[in-house]
Amino acid sequence: MPLHAPSLPLKPLAKTMAAAAPAPRVGRPPRLSTQAIIAAALEIGLDKVSFKQLAARLEVNVATIYRYVRNRSELLRLAAFQLTLGRRLPDQEHAHWSQLAMRYAEEMFESFMKEPELVAELLKGSIGPHVEMDVLDQFLGAMSRYGFSPEEGLLLHRAIGTFTIGAATGVIAVRARQAAGTPWHVEIRRTLIERADSDLPYVRQAMSEYLNFDEWHWLLPLHQLLAGIAAERGEELPTPQGRLARFFVAAPKPQPAPRIAKDGAG
């Protein structure tokens, strides 16, 4: 005779299981760490992150965040360090040194565009040089393989930083005007209209180029700087590639002069 399991009422069983389930954990999650806080801050965006937002995203109290990070300035410094460590030189063993330097500059610029708050913190002196040490040493080591002394590599690194920080500051300002509803090119045209026709004669001559704003325009003068360094080393730079290539438009080929008959007829 087959045995039948006794039927159990579903509702009481569900209540029993619910009662046996552990209560949700209150307080700090077991995996909360400074690294998790930095990752959450980068996801939110350093230009707008607050400790209240961090607490909500990580599901903790605001006071818990302060156990790991003392204030917003420290959070930005830690985030800057994280971004700096993530900015690696391109893995191209046979690339020319100038291509490595150019790509490094592009990645630094992209970091600033992704987190504009870092530029503001740099200008305030809140981010010290310690955040660059690891990547700087890597850069100097890479340049040494091309015959650069540490001192020469350091000068090159500083030049790249000057270009990228200056360019990032200008582009961030242009984007901010755009976001505020006052586009940069509109302000420029309005300024010219408000001034006498005889004012700003040289700016007016260069106006078409002035308004042709490109966020990557700084790559061209950086390339010229690298060309000067290469010339001192008895080298020539390779053909521009990537974003830089678009600034090198081939000049139109000269057209042959029209043939003129001896009697002067066309």
Image (cartoon, grey):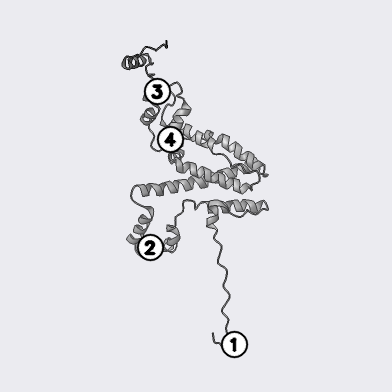
What residue sits 36% from the left and 65% below the top? 197
As drawn, 17 above or below 59: above
As drawn, 24 above or below 217: above
Marks 3/1: CA distance? 94 Å
Mark 4 belongs to which amino acid?
A: Glu
- Is residue 44 rendered to the left or right of residue 105? left
Q: Quadrant of residue 10?
A: top left
The answer to whether mark 4 and mark 2 are in CB contact below 8 A is no
Marks 2/3: CA distance? 59 Å
User: Tag 1 or tag 4, which sits nearer the N-term?
Assistant: 4
Which mark is on residue 43? Answer: 4
Q: Tell me the mark number nearer the camera, choosing from 4 and 3.
A: 4
User: Tag 1 or tag 3, which sits nearer the N-term?
Assistant: 3
Q: Quadrant of the C terminus?
A: bottom right
User: Tag 3 or tag 2, which sits nearer the N-term?
Assistant: 3
User: Tag 2 or tag 1, which sits nearer the N-term?
Assistant: 2
CA neighbours of label 2 inside 10 A, class few (<14), some (14 to 19), many (20+): few
Q: In which quarter of the image is the N terminus?
A: top left
Estimate the x, y position of residue 6 in percent, counting from the top left: 37, 12
Q: Quadrant of residue 21?
A: top left
Residue found at the very far bottom of the displayed protein: 263
What residue sits 36% from the left and 47% below the top? 179
Write down the residue under mark 1. Answer: 262
Estimate the x, y position of residue 229 in percent, counting from the top left: 62, 51
Which mark is on residue 199? Answer: 2
